[in-house]
């Protein structure tokens, strides 16, 4: 039995996303998603203006340095409207995980059996090791997802459905991933034979890359066996020939000069900066001369004001992103350049979806 | 810049949401609970409204009802569209006032990107 029959057997789905187990759960999640869109996403701009006015009236510095950020947090979190906003944000986050977790675990055995069945067939492949040694940093419950990325056998499904609700419809039908994949740089000489997606999680970007480069050999690697198992089944449901493998991005099991394109989509803010440096070294090693590396992630602090630093810090705390502040402060494009990448001009004004593009030098 | 500096959590561990479980944002935790309770009640109210609308549609079309069709079926596209609109209006009407201080009560629905 293919994953599609097992997961999509109910009525309502959102494109390629798995459905929940009951209509009741879907209606509940409809409410959560709409509430997030109205009470969180729609508020970002006006509440930002309101917050900046509070900072200005209090004579606070708008510089994004740690001291000013700490002062902004102290001031703004005394305001009842802002407390309400962040209370709502956290409650909705907890509610959507609680519902997603209980709904998918309701048919856990069926879903795991479908993942087992998917492993035996192609196109594509999946490889993992149940005795794989998981580094401690990867056990954080990122996004406050129950079990995080590595400690729940359904973590791939949880992440995929969670992303749907979290993105408020923007990720439905892989729209967001297709948009991100279209920003990936082609290598010098435009020849693309092999592509690597680092930290691929549910394999959504990996699949989008395969759609753009159907003739290329595409690999998705992730630290979590549960993620690559689901990523393979998901790609199978789209009839895409992709190889998924459990692997550390900082210890790549590939030959030197092997890939034409390497991509890291929203990976770097989920790892400590010390690991980021190792990943960049490994990326440079496995890229062929002239090969491109596209790192898509949040902007660095040099392009931010104190309010965006405040917002980022609150999001890091409320959304379980312990390594986000370190990543923002690292201004990763500077580390890339120091590691030896030839950097493409970078648009620092993009708050999210900021692409840092580097090429492996030809000499 | 040193790794120590780069790993600075910017006081993250002191923010309410850093704690797992049920963090509190207000000095009086009852306010936290009341906000969560109203959101949960809103979600459960919506579950009932959604089911009632689905039941009414099935009954009006088939004059009989099976529990299986309610849990495995889905409303018609037209009804789903009406439900989506009604849900947005309800959330805006009930909860929007929380943001009226800065005009956020009239903000239009928006996705993350």
Image (cartoon, coloured by chain):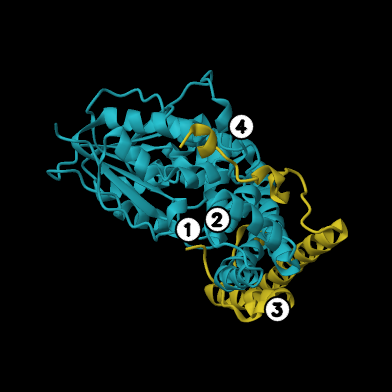
Chain colours: A cyan, B yellow
Query: What's the CA distance linking mark 1 and mark 2?
Result: 7 Å
What quarter of the picture does the C terminus of chain A occupy?
Answer: top left
For label 4, the crowd category at 10 Å Cα-Cα, with few meaning under 14, some 14 to 19 and many 20 or more, is some
Query: What's the CA distance linking mark 3 and mark 1?
Result: 26 Å
Residue at label 4?
A: A151
**Residue A120 visible in image:** no
Q: Earlier in the sequence, mark 1 or mark 2?
A: 1
Residue at label 1?
A: A304
Badge 2 element: helix
Label 3 is found on which chain of the structure? B
Residue B109 % position (x, y): 56, 73
Label 1 is found on which chain of the structure? A
Q: Quadrant of residue A166?
A: bottom right
Q: Which mark is residue A229?
A: none
Q: Earlier in the sequence, mark 1 or mark 4?
A: 4
Residue A49 % position (x, y): 57, 72
Badge 1 element: loop
Relative height, residue B49 to residue A77 (above, below): below
Relative height, residue A5 to residue A182 (above, below): above
Query: What's the CA distance linking mark 1 and mark 4?
Result: 35 Å
Q: From the viewer's perspective, is the residue at label 2 or at label 3 nearer?
A: 2
Judge left or right: residue B76 versus residue B56.
left
Q: Which mark is residue B101?
A: 3
**Residue A317 visible in image:** yes
Residue B73 % position (x, y): 60, 62
Q: Residue at x 76, y 67 (%)?
A: A80
Q: From the viewer's perspective, is the residue at label 3 or at label 4 nearer?
A: 3
Do marks 3 and 4 share a subunit? no
């Amino acid at each position: 039995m293919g994953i599609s029959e097992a997961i999509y057997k109910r009525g309502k789905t959102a494109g390629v996303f798995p459905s929940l187990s009951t209509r009741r759960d879907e209606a509940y999640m409809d409410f959560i998603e709409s509430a997030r869109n109205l009470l969180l996403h729609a508020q970002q701009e006006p509440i930002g203006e309101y917050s900046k006015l509070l900072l200005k009236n209090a004579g606070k510095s708008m510089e994004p340095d740690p001291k000013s950020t700490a002062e902004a947090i102290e001031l703004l979190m005394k305001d009842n409207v802002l407390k309400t906003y962040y209370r709502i944000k956290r409650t909705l986050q907890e509610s959507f995980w609680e519902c997603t977790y209980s709904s998918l675990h309701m048919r856990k055995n069926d879903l795991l059996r479908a993942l087992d069945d998917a492993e035996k067939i192609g196109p594509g492949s999946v490889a993992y090791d149940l005795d794989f040694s998981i580094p401690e940093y990867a056990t954080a419950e990122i996004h406050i997802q129950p079990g995080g990325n590595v400690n729940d056998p359904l973590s791939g499904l949880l992440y995929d459905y969670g992303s749907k609700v979290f993105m408020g419809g923007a990720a439905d039908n892989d729209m967001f991933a297709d948009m991100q994949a279209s920003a990936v740089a082609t290598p010098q000489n435009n020849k693309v034979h092999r592509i690597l997606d680092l930290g691929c999680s549910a394999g959504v970007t990996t699949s989008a890359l395969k759609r753009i480069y159907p003739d290329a050999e595409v690999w998705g690697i992730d630290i979590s066996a549960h993620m690559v198992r689901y990523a393979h089944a998901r790609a199978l449901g789209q009839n895409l020939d992709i190889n998924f493998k459990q692997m550390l991005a900082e210890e790549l099991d590939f030959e030197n000069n092997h890939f034409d394109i390497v991509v890291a989509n929203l990976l770097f803010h989920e790892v400590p900066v010390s690991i980021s440096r190792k990943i960049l070294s490994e990326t440079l090693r496995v890229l062929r001369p002239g090969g491109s590396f596209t790192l898509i992630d949040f902007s660095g602090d040099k392009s931010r004001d104190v309010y965006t630093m405040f917002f980022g810090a609150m999001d890091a705390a409320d959304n379980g992103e312990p390594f986000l502040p370190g990543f923002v402060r690292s201004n990763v494009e500077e580390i890339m350049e120091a590691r030896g990448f030839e950097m493409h001009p970078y648009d620092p004004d993009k708050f999210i979806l900021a692409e840092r593009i580097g090429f492996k030098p030809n000499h | 810049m040193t790794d120590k500096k780069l790993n600075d959590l910017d006081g993250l561990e002191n923010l309410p949401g850093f704690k797992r479980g049920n963090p509190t944002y207000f000095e009086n935790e009852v306010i936290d609970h009341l906000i969560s309770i109203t959101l949960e009640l809103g979600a459960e109210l919506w579950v009932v409204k959604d089911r009632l609308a689905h039941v009414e549609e099935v009954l009006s079309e088939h004059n009989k009802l099976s529990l299986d069709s309610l849990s495995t079926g889905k409303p018609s596209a037209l009804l789903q569209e009406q439900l989506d609109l009604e849900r947005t209006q309800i959330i805006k009407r009930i909860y929007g006032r929380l943001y009226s201080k800065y005009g956020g009560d009239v903000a239009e629905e928006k996705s993350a990107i």
